Amino acid sequence: MARDLIEERVRVAGRVEVLVQRRGSGQPVLYLHGLDGVVGDGLFLDRLAEQFEVIAPAHPGWPGGGDGAFLDDPLDMALHYGDLIRDLGLGPVPVVGWSVGGMFAAELAAIEPDLVSAVVLISSYGLWDESVPTEDLFTLLPGDLRNYLWSDPNGALASAHHAVPSDPEMAIDLRFAGIVAMTGSAKYLWGIPDRGLSRRLYRITSPTLIVWGTGDRLIPATYAHRFQAAIAGSQVLTVDRAGHCIIREHPVEVADAIVAFVKARIDKEAIA
Amino acid sequence: MNLHLFNLMPYRLLPQDFAERYRSVWVDIPRDLYDPAQGHGLYHEYIDQFVLADELGFDGICVNEHHQNAYGTMPSPNLMASILARITTNASIVVLGDSIALYNPPTRVAEEMAMLDVLSGGRLVAGFPVGTPQDTCVCYGMSPATLRDRYNEAHALIMRAFTEDQPFTFNGKYTKLRYVNLWPRTIQQPHPPIWIPSGSSVETWDFTLENDYVMCYLSFVGWERAAKNVSGYWKRADELGKDKNPYRLGFIQAVFVADTDEEAERLYGDHVKFFYNKCLRTWPGFVDLPGYRSLASIRAGLTAWKAPTEPMDVAWKDLVEDGSIIAGSPETVRRRLVEAAETLRVGQMMLLLQLGSMPPQLAELNMRMFMSEVAPHVRSMWSDHEDHWSPAPMANRFGVAPGSGRALGDERPI
């Protein structure tokens, strides 16, 4: 069931104004979106919002996120999200990040451990394995990208997501938003998407859940275990018949796993 | 009008079925297609053509930078320019150029340009391209998001290095240097002419006009297709209060001369088609990179994504008719070249006279026919305008004695 959705513009640390989506109520959870922005994540976020207040800001440099020129690298982005958590009075807060957002969530948890109460990394960028390189998504043809995003690239879900609006103006706006999002992503993932996160993962002390689709063609599922090996006490959940777009292909299953994980942490802390 | 010879130094021995078998002539072209023993001959063949160009009286000889590319085998144009500075005498050495965002520190480019200027006796044109997405972002790993920022910073540093008389500090975002002190100094003062190769970026038009640099429109689409963009450049010059001096603009144009139009097709046809149908085959994913073009430029000219083309099969007739090439009898070439130069208002005409698989005998025939049958009829164009953008060499320069490889003895200045 669709939750009431509130959109507001939030000025962060006096530096940038970003669009923030809020859904649900109760325990806040911060969600950091993936490559193409928050726009396609509704079903997943609605499901999470049945149990939490889900706060989903746009990254600076992506559609809705304002000009990201003041950020150079994922560490800058992590500082920005530390600022946002403080400005919104959320911390410590569970942080869920998908794809490039997972990279930012991991950086945030590593450098601002006091602001993060739990981490969920879904199909996350940030590590590099020479023997299993991530796909070079920026040199894929736009028409080919969907083959790397979905476990079933020709299924109904993928087709609905990639459908071109019949209105030409809307089609151009949508395509332009896609270019903006890819431009934003390229800043942090260009070439080899390793910006030193592996040197900082040891600093993550909050409980960590790592979620991956076994059919992820952008970042192979073996990366789940690389993250797990680097983050003490972390757990891995793999999902079959799921590609990189795991939260769009299996919104209920992934959201429910996150709810259970986060609630268990909160209950444990309450008991302690 | 200045007439410059451009040579891309193609690996002209690609297999005939290249376009069917491989996706790209650039970036990930199989290494085993390059035979270094053949490459040895090709480098010398192309250097010979530049030397001939100097002897025939071309105003400039142009080299450029490409990486991991079979139609341009000059990863370092400065290496070739260095040879040419030594063994040619009069032609401008036009380096078009060094992709300055790629070099760390960029003062290395200033140093090498200064070496070339001194070595050539002040014949250098210093070109500073942003660089193609293939070369800069894919082959050299620059993030497209920061490429232009790096370029702007490198340009500022290089120009200060050329012009400041005292050591200075440079605290940039990408380069931090406590002591910048360019040795050697350039012969041309305050610095060699700066030419900026570009396609059709509005930002580059403004950059070149505001700095009074030459804007070189480098593409292989030919003059008719380029006319719309170039008229935008001149409109922008008006808006910025700059004169419409044709010498502000460079343009690259492939030209093929023979006794008759039919003879031109017979002589050059297959070699030219080899270039357009094989050498230009580039994987589209290496071209349209997110962040390479400014979002404003994209928004302004956004069109639907074009599917990758199949291996092309362009006909000679089409290439001639759409202006991609200017080819035919001397009379035909003269007429079309004047038409192109007038339409574009271009004073720096950069001629591609070797293209694709063209062997040296044909390239040299083309160069000789161009200079004897065409050049005398077009050189006087724009003589009512002053050329502020060509090198000013020193008078008493070293030359090389033909055949000896040694500097001329008695003529040596003391």
Image (tube, helix red, strand yellow):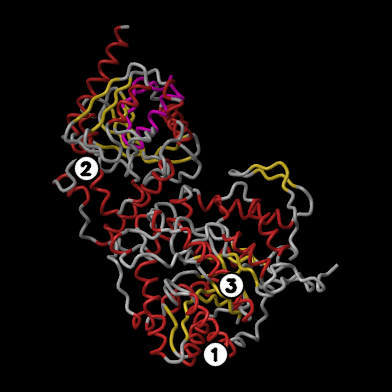
Instruction: State the CA–CA distance, disc 2 to disc 1.
Output: 62 Å
> What residue is rendered at 48% in x and 87% in y?
B333
Tell me which numbered mark, 3 or 1, is placed earlier along the sequence. Answer: 3
Name the spot of residue B334 as percent of width and height, x first: 50, 89
**Residue pointed to by mark 3:** B50
> Extreme right residue here?
B414
**Residue pointed to by mark 1:** B373
> What residue is rendered at 36% in x and 20% in y?
A117
Mark 1: which amino acid? Glu
For the magenta stretch, what is the residue range? A92-120
> What residue is rendered at 38% in x and 45% in y?
A62
Name the spot of residue A68 as percent of width and height, x first: 46, 44
| Location of residue B347 with respect to A164 vertically, above or below | below
| Location of residue B5 with respect to B30 vertically, above or below | below
Name the spot of residue A67 as percent of width and height, x first: 45, 46
**Residue pointed to by mark 2:** A150
Instruction: State the CA–CA distance, disc 2 to disc 3.
Output: 53 Å
Q: Are marks 3 and 1 in contact (CB under 8 Å)?
A: no
Q: Quadrant of the N terminus of chain A?
A: top left
Q: Chain of mark 2?
A: A
> Extreme top residue here?
A272
